[in-house]
Amino acid sequence: MASSSPSDLENPHATCSYAPLPGGTGDEPTVSRHPKKSAAIFLVCAFLSLAFVVALIGVDKAELNTNEAAVVLSRGRGVDKGVSEKSFRPLLGAENSYPWSSNMLDWQRTGFHFQPKNNWMNDPNGPVFYKGWYHLFYQYHPDAPVWGKIVWGHAVSKDLVNWRHLPIAMETDQWYDEQGVWTGSATILPDGQLVVLYTGSTNESVQVQNLAYPADPSDPLLINWVKYPGNPVLVPPPGIDEKDFRDPTTAWKTPEGKWRITIGSKVNKTGISLVYDTEDFKSFELLDQVLHAVPGTGMWECVDFYPISKQGENGLDTSIDGPGVKHVVKASMDDDRNDYYSIGTYDALKGKWTPDNPASDVGIGLRYDYGIYYASKTFYDQDKQRRVLWSWIKETDTEASDISKGWASLMGVPRTILLDKKTQTNIIQWPVEEINRLRTNATVFKNLVVEAGSLVPLELPAASQLDIVAEFELDEATVMRLNDVSDADVAYDCAKNGGAATRGALGPFGITVLAHEGLIEHTPVYFYVAKGVDGNLKTFFCADQSRSSSAMDVDKSIYGNVVPVMKGEKLSMRILVDHSIVESFAQGGRTCITSRVYPTKAIYNNAQVFLFNNATAATVTASLSIWQMKSAQI
């Protein structure tokens, strides 16, 4: 039995064993206006264990039907206009829509993730804290739940959790943004003035940069905006394609006292970040060299550049520099639609940034998130002295489904960013502390011993909105024994090694969420410890969507990557479950994975959570605190 208090009570060591999977041995281990019990236990355990094996092997072949609202595009929405693809297309053979009921679609809307009341949303734009309010602008199509002629939606909050929707901030009402008011950033000047630079797609689909500012700077809600009469302030320079020049960053101060920005682009297949200096945000000087370039990475979108402290625990204003500071360059890669970052050194005199580790450069190394996470943007929250990260989380179902439910896309939970002081080679991302205010009704499980090949149902009041914090300890004797095995688990890969179905001596083990009774549908989030080609043990953090839904017209990828684990650390994870989005954080936020899942059965009161250990040899001891999450006002 689980407790209803976060302390003192322990959970019995109840486990259920099951046979190894077939094939395994069992031993191996944008002024504009615009007017969401013993015998019984044994039988349940036996049934669930058998169901877990079956669920790991395959998914029900649901009968598909054709939805006439579905739109099939040869290149995907947005590509012909000069932006990354804005539509998800199922794998060949799964184009027809599952017969989604209104009940299923209603369940998918989240309780505490930001999203407009209806229609399409993508990139976060110009996030800023201004006169006591957090502002989030975002790419918004007000007429349909699919990408189209984009304007700037606008919402404000006092706490980054509860949001008030405001009128559209900037419309497509000028020749220089007729085809779209695209992504941009906000900069607060020393006198408190606020300016915004954004990309406009002109009447001829040329990407240009434009200046806007509040019509009434004294208005803390920033309802009305003015576009500079001299727009555009920047056009593509010689050698840059007219559709490869977008997404200006927040500006920062140079040693000469000017303002500096960078804009994403490419030359052939080399991704680059152009650098411009300005004194007034109206006239700009292009520097001779780029901030950074990486061959083979393609178009860089939504470039971000910011400092992080080498020792401090606070975030830094974008203009901060000095010996105790490193700088992050992040770019959203148009080619694969993932957000990559790298930590390095910035030469302010030359306007040049160099990665600390070229092997882990932008576009080829670390990612913010190894799941669905794109077009992210940070801002410095001067009120709480922290750097906050926003990101667009796209849908990975069909347009037909989005049209039926009337909305598409979310923002990820805002995260804070700090340098990992232990590794010095990666950042730490963690949900903003305000999210914790939504926690209620804690259930605690302490020191659960989970034998190899075991599955434990966790009794919870509900399972569609959760905050799960868990720690795991592996049996040390088995770990030491594996160190002596020369041929164990070389070159493990979350996506390529079968997900939670692949058994090894030291994994997979973790938590499966949004699970249906019998595990017909479930989404495992887990660790897998394996010996790498260098002979050392490595820990992988993965999320397996392959069995998340009986529908065939949704993404069922398996995501994950290595997570650094320092000596003496327990393995730890945090999982935020909010209906159709699952955000997972390992080792305090060193590795993060965002999943979009669309169950057909594991919804409402039919959603459950299980603790599992699918290793062949290791025993795992787990302790968990699980909170129900209240819905935010959005």
Image (cartoon, rainbow, N blue to C red):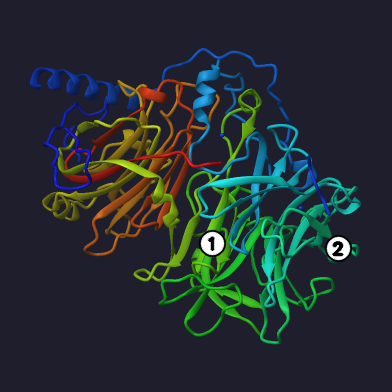
Name the residue nearer the viewer: 282 or 111: 111
The answer to whether 272 is drawn above or below residue 622 in the figure is below
> Which quadrant: the N terminus?
top left
In the image, taking residue 614 as reference, residue 578 lies left or right, namely: right
Report how many numbered discs are placed on residues in the image: 2
**Element under disc 1:** strand
Residue at the spot 73% in from the left edge and 39% down from the top edge: 141
Does the residue at mark 1 contact the one at mark 2 (Cβ under 8 Å)? no
Disc 1 designates what residue?
A: 341
Q: Residues within 10 Å of mark 1 (few under 14, many from 20)?
A: many
x, y (%) of residue 147? 71, 37
The answer to whether 115 is drawn above or below residue 30 in the figure is above
Name the residue nearer the viewer: 75 or 161: 161
Measure the alpha-carbon separation of dots 1 and 2.
Answer: 33 Å
In the image, taking residue 380 as reference, residue 41 lies left or right, namely: left
Q: Residues within 10 Å of mark 2 (few under 14, many from 20)?
A: few
Which numbered disc, 1 or 2, marks the residue that appears first in the sequence? 2
**Element under disc 2:** loop
In the image, taking residue 623 as reference, residue 494 lies left or right, namely: right
Q: Amino acid at mark 2?
A: Tyr
x, y (%) of residue 78? 74, 41
Disc 2 designates what residue?
A: 228
Instruction: Point out the frontmost of discs 1 and 2.
Output: 2
Residue at the spot 37% in from the left edge and 71% down from the top edge: 421
